[in-house]
Amino acid sequence: MPILEAVLIAVAVLALLGVIFEEVIHVNKAKTTLFFGTLSWVLLFLFSSGADETATVSAGLSESIAEIAGLWLFLVAAMTFVAYLNKKGMIENMIYLIMPRQVTERKLLFLTGLFCFVFSSLADNITATLVSCSLILSLNLDLKKRLQFIVLVVFAVNSGGVSLITGDVTTLMIFLAGKVEILTLLTLAIPASITVFLLAVLLSGGLSGTVTLRASSNEVRAVDAVIAGLFLVTIIATISGNALFSIPPVLTFLFGLSIMFLVSRFMSDDSDLDPILEYIRVIEFETLLFFLGILLLVGMLKEIHALDSLVAIYDVLPPVYANYLMGIFSAVIDNVPLTAALLKSGINMSPGEWMGLTYAVGVGGSLLVIGSAAGIVAMSKIEGLTFGAYLKYALHLLAAYTAGYVGVILLGAAMNG
């Protein structure tokens, strides 16, 4: 068994290296993690020593699959809403509706940070980043100013996602594990929004010009407006239903998705040309498969009790300091496997300390451009945004992250008091 454990740990390390060096080996991280994740469980079954051990492994796999299914179904429902609204131009329309036609660069920086913060808490940070990149590219700014905008965008979309389960997968994972309550998470928006404003102040130097925004050319249909409203109602119902009646968020979102299908059927006249069910096919299944592979790997590591070493830092340092470091680690190690491993490792923390970890792993990835999906998406869209160019703003980002973390800890202490 020790040999098998060593092999399985090596498999997990290879999967992590595949994620880190995705751009070097040119193999999508979803393919890498799914391969190693399923391989690890196959090996556990092949080399189990008897019927009792096989039954234990089977029970562990069933537990992991059940957790993954809940996460998957929630994300499928949320991502289908966002895919539809994005395709219909509703998100772009919203930007140009709330933004003034002519605005100073400094004011636009703050408005962009505010939009990214709010929108990424409702939808996913990848969509928020893509929309914001389109806005920035349309302004014809010089490279330095463009970088100032995009650095704020990456930090703001990651900060916005931490307070709502619809905004960040790690927040959703921590909530589904029963570590924090849904209304408690909402309070994270206070320190997170303040630090986005703080970073905007730090980045606003040298922005003195005026820009003119183009008007949106997308036509808004009644059915699209109704579905946009339904999306917001579904989010509110998810929060209130869980807080008041303990309704699982996945059930509320799937109910909202079913209403979306019916609304489209009875309000739309182009059901044959643009069937609503097609939008399930355009969501980011690569992302979902990546989560599947990662969670299978982490479940395997829990099964062989290999996660004990991960919590060693919590034996050396109090959770308040260990969580802060975990946020910094998440800029190098993907925050999804890091969070999954911490949840499976059996760490005992207070709700306030779990809030600190939620903020840390959600926002810490902003410290490096490769540390979050938002940063990687921005690199692919903004010419001149390189690892080194982003690193020049590391002190600004570290200051904002630290201030936000301190704010979360003070908030948690106040709530416990």
Image: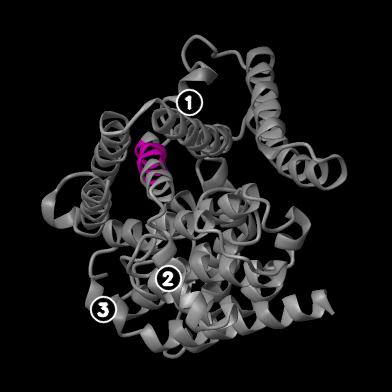
x and y, in percent, of residue 403 in the image: 58, 85
Residue under pointer 2: 366
Q: What residue lies at 23% left-to-right and 48% top-to-bottom? A: 11
> In the image shown, does 233 or 12 lie closer to the viewer?
12
| Residue at the spot of label 1 | 280
For the C terminus, the image quarter is bottom right
> Left or right: 174 with respect to 178?
left
Q: Earlier in the sequence, mark 3 or mark 2?
A: 2
Question: Which residue, given by chain and number where applicable, does mark 3 sit on?
Answer: 389
Residue depicted at x 37% and y 60%: 334
In terms of sequence position, does the residue under pointer 3 or pointer 1 come before the other? 1
Q: Does residue 104 appear in this view? A: no
Q: Amino acid at mark 2?
A: Ser
Amino acid type indicated by mark 3: Ala
Secondary structure of the magenta portion, mostly?
A: helix
x, y (%) of residue 263? 69, 20
Q: Amino acid at mark 1?
A: Ile
Quarter of the figure with residue 102: bottom right
Q: Is residue 294 magenta?
A: yes
User: Is label 3 in contact with label 1 (beta carbons under 8 Å)?
Assistant: no
Residue 81 shows up from this direction: yes
Q: Quadrant of residue 70?
A: top right
Query: Bounds of the magenta span?
Result: 286-295
